[in-house]
Each structure stands twice: as C-alpha cells, then as structure tokens.
Amino acid sequence: MNERYSRQILFSPIGTEGQRKLQDSSVCIIGMGALGTVLANHMVRAGVGFVRIVDRDYVEASNLQRQLLYDEDDVAQGYPKVVAAQKKLSRINSEVRIEAIVADATAGSIEKLLDGIDLVLDGTDNFQTRFLLNDACFRRGIPFIYGGAVSSRGMSAVLVPGETPCFRCFVPAGDSSGQTCDMIGVISPIVDIIASYQAVEALKLLVGARDARRDSLLSIDVWGNRTFEMKLGEPRADCPCCQLKQYPALQAQGEEAVALCGRETVQFASKGPMDLPGWELRLKPVATTILRNVYLLRAELPDGERLVLFPDGRVLVQGTEDLTRAKVLYDRYIGS
C-alpha cells in the first residue's frame, strides 16, 4: 500500500485488508450535483478502484454555491457535470478509474449503468429517479445508499436487498412530490453532512463491516438543530419492489417530454443521435448566441428561451416549465 492511504489504513476497522477491498470495489454515483460531487470526492480520495459517475446536466453558475467540484471555468466552457467532475477527480487520484457518462438514468438505460457495480450511491434530486434506482438495485441485489437534502434538512438510509426494507417501504410513490432545492433553496453544509454520512456507510459496506451499518433512516435539520432517527423496521408486506418483486419503475414507459421540477426546463427524450456541428449550422440563423463543444450545443432563442442538445439525442428546452410552450419550441426548431 502506498503512502496516499496511510492514515486511512491506520484506522483499524479498515486497515490494510480493507484498503485492498476498496481498491477492488466498483461504485456508481447517479447524479453529480451537490450530493454527487461530495460523494465522488470521498470515494476517489478513499481509493475505491472504479467510480462510475452519471448525470444528464451541465454546469451552471447557480451550481457553484454547493457543488464542490466545479468552478467558473466549467460554467464558461459549458461542460457536462460528469466531464468537469472527471477532470478534477483524475487530478485528485490518478490511481482510480473514473468513468463519466453523460446520460439520463431511465428504465431503458439503468441496467447498463449498473453493470459491474458493487454499490450505488444516490446523488439525485428527484423521487422519480430514486424509485428507479431502488427498483433496479433490489432486482439485481446491489446495496443502495439513499441521500437527499433541501433547505437546511437532509435524510439518508442504507438499503440492502435481502437485509433491509427498500425505499418504497417508507416513501410510497404517491407521497413523493416533495420540495426541491430549486423551489425553496439549500445551504451547502447540509449537503456535505448528508453526503458524508452516505460515504461512511459506503466504506463500511465495501470493506465488509456490515455489523457497523446504520439501520435507521437518519433525518437532520442543521438550521433548526434537530436530529432524528427512525428504525427501518420490517419491509411492507405489500411493497411492489422488495416483497412482490414487480419493480414498477422498471416497467414504466418514458414520456416524450418531462418538466424538471423547479428548473424551468422541459426535457425531451432521445429520438436518436444528434450531429451537433450540423445542428449548429441549422440553428445559427435563428439563435442569438450559440455555444458548442464536444458534449453539447446550447442555443439562445430570440424570445429568451434556450435549447440544449446532446449527442445522444436528448433536448432541453430551458426558460419554461409549460409543456405546451416547450413542445411548440421543440417542434419549431427541432422538428418531430
């Protein structure tokens, strides 16, 4: 073992053998926003051998307050979050293999995203994707560490197929319309705290210290000075995921257009690969400004909205949450 991990190895619950296990492990972080950047930082610095990071979005100025791997240059370059994160993380620890995937986690893509993965870390900001991760992980027997943060509050739980209830057992699908940081804000310290709780539980699982695993849903309000733990208890007998094995999120058909809550953004599903240089030529006569790199094309429209095109065929219409208005713009500039 090299000097890099010497202080971590001195921590007896990890030690030399635990460090070897970390280096032989593979984790997937879905969502590289506030939680995801802290999680990735911890996993890479700890020496987890393979880290796959997945996110559909690019770096914006509003991210910099809490998404700790990004800087103003990433905003100016219009980098996808995973690309900017990979550049930073590779400079932090060149021994770790980091795979950056610019993609949306969907029922159609999740199986491939979890191939070869020992543990999934939740860096998402919406319940729809969490249900998807939960169902995919429980079907494949992969531990899933949930985390969420908004305002000054955060929650986390360790969910292990065959050993604990799943996410659906304590957050039924009908109760999942909660607030987001784009609606009521968030302060950076709660993000760091929740992601750090997730990270330490990940280390426990990866080194095999399952007897040290937290067996509760942890809830913290750092502004209100409150901490609460609720035992996970037994799975719900009628849970469609961990008990009935129906995995509803994996059966869902993707919608053509989805409003991203609180983001003034509507995402249109991929209809096939996009040639970004070709689309730049097509949009240049109608756009006020255009930014293109190898990862995306961003075009400002005359009425103030923005189109963001990705090579995989996804399109974001930004500046509106009105599906009708977004579809008008999509049809006008992109076509059906």
Image (cartoon, rainbow, N blue to C red):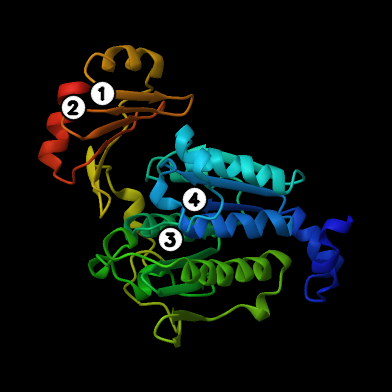
| C-alpha gap between disc 1 and disc 4 | 30 Å
Q: Can residue 160 be seen in this view?
A: no
Q: Name the residue under label 2.
A: 302
Assign a secondary structure to mark 1: loop
The first of marks 1 and 4 along the sequence is: 4
Residue shown at the point (44%, 82%) measured from the top left: 234
Residue 320 placed where, x, y %? 18, 43
Q: Name the residue under label 1.
A: 288
Assign a secondary structure to mark 4: loop
Q: Give the residue type at disc 3.
A: Asn
Q: How crowded is mark 3: few (under 14 residues within 10 Å), some or many (20 or more)?
A: many
Q: Residue 182 carries which label?
A: none
In what quadrant of the picture does the N terminus appear? Answer: bottom right
Seen from the viewer's position, the closer of residues 88 and 197 is 88
Q: Give the residue type at disc 1.
A: Thr
Assign a secondary structure to mark 3: helix
Q: Can residue 196 be seen in this view?
A: yes
Residue 5 placed where, x, y %? 82, 60
The answer to whether residue 164 is left or right of residue 15 is: left
Q: Give the residue type at disc 4.
A: Met
Q: In this view, does 152 lie above or below 107?
A: below
The first of marks 2 and 4 along the sequence is: 4
Assign a secondary structure to mark 2: loop
Q: Name the residue under label 3.
A: 134
| C-alpha gap between disc 3 and disc 2 | 41 Å
Q: Nearer the viewer, mark 1 or mark 3?
A: 1
Q: Give the residue type at disc 2.
A: Pro
